Image: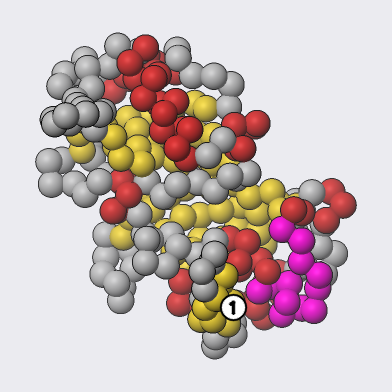
Amino acid sequence: MKLRVKFSKHGVLRFIGHLDVMRYFQKAIRRAGIDIAYSTGFSPHQIMSFAAPLGVGLESNGEYMDIEVHSLTSAKELVDALNAQMVDGIQVLEARLLPDNAGNAMASVAAARYTIAFREAYRPVFLTQSVINDFISQNKIIVTKKTKKSETTFDIKPFIYECSFLEENPVIILTVDASSANNIKPSLVVRALYERNQQIFDEFGLLITREETYTNCGTPDAVSLIPLGAVGSEY
């Protein structure tokens, strides 16, 4: 049976990298007595696939991993068994039974929604809903994306699905493409917003939380996003 497990990651564990989170869950699954399936071959490993890895320093309420198990009493029992092995900062939220033809979590990711808050000393006094509207109404939003080996300039406007602002907090709500082909980082969008308004940008001032991860049940030209956790059924 294929299962999709949703979990959150907060507190000091936001500084733990993706590979360490994967190893942590491998140990937690063994300790919880989950009847997980293993690959065949010379070096068997647990059949496990994570959705888009979370950047170091980011918190999340919408992380996903897929696992395969030989047997299962109920999804609730699995969630309770895993949570009994969790440390402060990681909580398993739900588990759903996937259909046999479901794509794995990593291949299914199309977008992610973030809330972006600000450290006290970095609150942007210039930011209002009208500033956000001006930013998102541009025909193109050209940015420069740097990697270790190259530097690319491109238009991120087609990959921003939502951008709004809550003035009382203040918090930016941002939904962007998170697929393997594009994978727009929220800090890249905020940097472009600051540059549009001639403001000094410091990524340290951002407090970013991934709220949900989505798959596209539409087409590339007509995107229809649903949470990864909405795929499958209760068990």
Residue at the spot 45% in from the left edge and 77% down from the top edge: 158
Residue at 48% over, 33% down:
20
Task: Look at the image and say whether residue 201 sits in the magenta stretch.
Answer: yes
Amino acid marked by disc 1: Val
Q: Position of residue 100 (x, y in %)?
A: 12, 41
Q: Quadrant of the C terminus?
A: top left
Q: Is residue 79 visible?
A: no
Tell me the quadrant of the picture where the N terminus can be found: top left
What percent of the width, then of the height, locates residue 107?
Answer: 28, 53
Residue 6 at x, y percent in the picture: 40, 35
Residue 13 lies in quadrant:
top right
In the image, 221: left or right of 86?
Answer: left
Q: Which residues are magenta?
A: 192-203
Q: Is residue 210 above or below residue 38?
A: below
Q: Is residue 41 left or right of residue 152?
A: left
Residue 183 visible within the image: yes
**Residue 122 magenta:** no
Q: Residue drawn at (79%, 49%), measured in percent from left and top?
A: 119
Kindly identify which residue carries mark 1: 143
Q: Measuring 34% from the left and 19% from the top, which residue is drawn there? A: 29
Q: Secondary structure at mark 1?
A: strand
Q: Is residue 188 above or below residue 4?
A: below
Instruction: Report x, y in % for residue 223.
Output: 34, 68
Camera-nearest residue between 134 and 12 = 12
Q: Is residue 182 positioned above or below 198 on the image?
A: above
* Most foreground residue, 165 or 65: 65
In-front residue for pair 133/9:
9
* Residue 201 lies in quadrant: bottom right
Residue nearest the viewer, comparing 156 with 139: 156
Q: Is residue 228 left or right of residue 7?
A: left
